Amino acid sequence: MNAESVETLRHKIRSIDSVPSMPVIIRPLLEMLQRPLEKLNVADVVNLISCDKSLAVQCVRMANSPLFPRLNEVENVRSAVVALGLQRVQSIVLGCSLNQIVPADKWVLEMSIFWRHSLGCALVSRKIATLIGYADPEKAYLAGLIHDVGILVNSMVCHEKFRRCLQLASSEKITLVEAEEKCLGFSHVLTGKILAEQWNLPQNLSRVIEYHHAVSDTETEALVCLVRLSDLICRVRDLGYGYYENIAVDLVNEPAWTALEAAYSGLKDMDGARLLLDVEASMDAIIKAVDDVFVTKN
Amino acid sequence: MPVSAASPAPAEEAHDLKDPAYLKIRDLIYHISGIYQPDEKLYLLASRCAQRMNTVHAKTPSEYLDHLTVRGNRDAELRMLLNEITIGETYMFRSVPQLDALRSVILPQIMQAKASMGFKRLRFWSAGCSTGEEPYTLAMFLLENQQLLNGWTFDILATDLNDRSLEAAKAGIYGEYALRNTTDALRKKYFTTHDAKRLQASDTLKSLVHFDRVNLSDDSKMTFLKGMDVIFCCNVLIYFDLNSKRKVVQHFHANLLPSGYLFLGHAESLFQVTDIFHLVHFPGTSAYWKPPIGYKGGSKP
């Protein structure tokens, strides 16, 4: 893609910020994501979420999902923040806000399929992160949740053409990125990166969005590798893009695995077969959480 | 999503899944047999344990754990429990994701590699075929995918240790349970009516499967079975202890041609048994791949 067409694309993506469905809290929320955790306080976050009633409801529902084990039922935003911690709540709120941005008639990939994949990646990233001793599993969760934000961008800014990408991908059983490159000349990786820049998302998240399909060398940072692996795992366990992909995934021989292995010796002992069965078994909980939280029933 | 092995437990609430004994039993089974029950499926394990607990008069899961670990007949009891866990595992088209993987990736890959050497024949082995559902499914699948085979021929070897199972397999008479996942079109095409409730595999279908009695621990026989492209060995290795399992898997490795695949049962794993195979994941299923000599790694499609 030449610089000019990237500029045109950038211009189109800028218009996303003014869509009527944009939740009011998204700007302050994005700003909050920049701040280190110790500079956040519970009251600020609770106040922010409470500005948007439907968001607050979604947040409480998500907090009550079995995907977030905790002791007691969460009844309001404050207890959700206390029970789950600021970082988890930020992830949940960001997910719910992103969901609101796309108007109902603009979804190309079905809303529930998109969120099953995103939530699946979030959970698997966090799980692998925990297993190998990665310092910030919640960061891995957030990265997994938003890695495909470019799909939302594509749905909005090149709606019809993106629909054709998905049709091509499912009829040829190829990856979505391949189909996008063929029909659009670029993929959700680029549009996601442009949105990440526009929103000043933290650099490491932006890199996850940009490189999760392009881990080729062993120098790649752990967060990108975690999301790359969980993306692959989800796509072979019915948490992909809703169509059959002709893929064979040999995790141990993925560059992302090799890169992670250099930094985390725990990876060597990870039981791949067992991990995949766990992912498969959490399917029902993921579907339920997505139906409860993201799929709007109106 | 693969079809769940059995319907959910009738009285899910009846078992206290928080009892740590269930987790211990789960880990014991995984360690011994390679069958893994994720947390979300513990209720299934609990209901299978409940059947056995009834029989052996164990009142609590932890008492039953004793039966599996310290009592004199622990090996026999473990076997009985494994029988309960894998019950209902065989019917035609039990694992559609395996067939999808064969069609989309595995067979094209194997055929490409073999064609370059001038081969035009594929060899499949159903090791532990029980009453024949697996090899007949494979035969139907291959017949239905002629365009994929494109003139290639194939043979299917189906072996079991149990003579009675083999007799039943050769007779090829199946009831509704075995055929629950078989479409009407396939029933019409590959079966004839046996009696009011059962169908019989057609002669065409039977002629494609060669049945034989093989003990997987019989080294002399195992060494003889060469040149396989794909081996299916579902829920068989679970009954072997670690050493025998290692030996069988080593044999499978030798029996397979380079780039061949080994399929195990859905919840089975070779973790800590061997690393001579590569675990490869396909949509909805996983398989063990024998890398060709000189394979340096690197990602595949």
Image (tube, grey):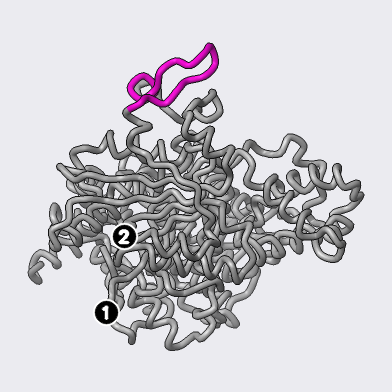
Query: Residue A128: where, in percent of width, then height?
Result: 52, 71
Kindly give the residue lying farthest to the top in the view shown. Answer: B196
Magenta segment: B187-203
- Left or right: A265 with respect to A176? right
Q: In the rendered image, is residue B1 in sight? A: yes
Query: Residue A138: where, in percent of width, then height?
Result: 55, 72
Judging from the image, mark 2 belongs to the subunit labelled: B
Which of these two is toward me, B21 or A38? Answer: B21
Label 2 sits on residue: B227
- Left or right: B58 with respect to A25? right
Which of these two is toward me, B141 or B46? Answer: B141
Return the mark for residue B208.
Answer: none
Dot 1 crowding, Cα within 10 Å, few <14, some 14–19, many 20+: few
Quarter-of-image position of residue A74: bottom right
Residue B11 in the image: above or below residue A127: above
Query: Residue B140: where, in percent of width, then height?
Result: 34, 34
Q: In the rendered image, is residue A160 in sight? A: no
Q: Amino acid at mark 2?
A: Gly
Q: Amino acid at mark 1?
A: Gly
Q: Which mark is first along the chain, 1 or 2?
A: 2
Q: Secondary structure at mark 2?
A: loop
Q: Is the residue under label 1 in contact with that under label 2 (CB below 8 Å)?
A: no
For the point 14% across and 67% down, the residue is A7
- Left or right: B20 with respect to B129? right
Q: Secondary structure at mark 1?
A: loop
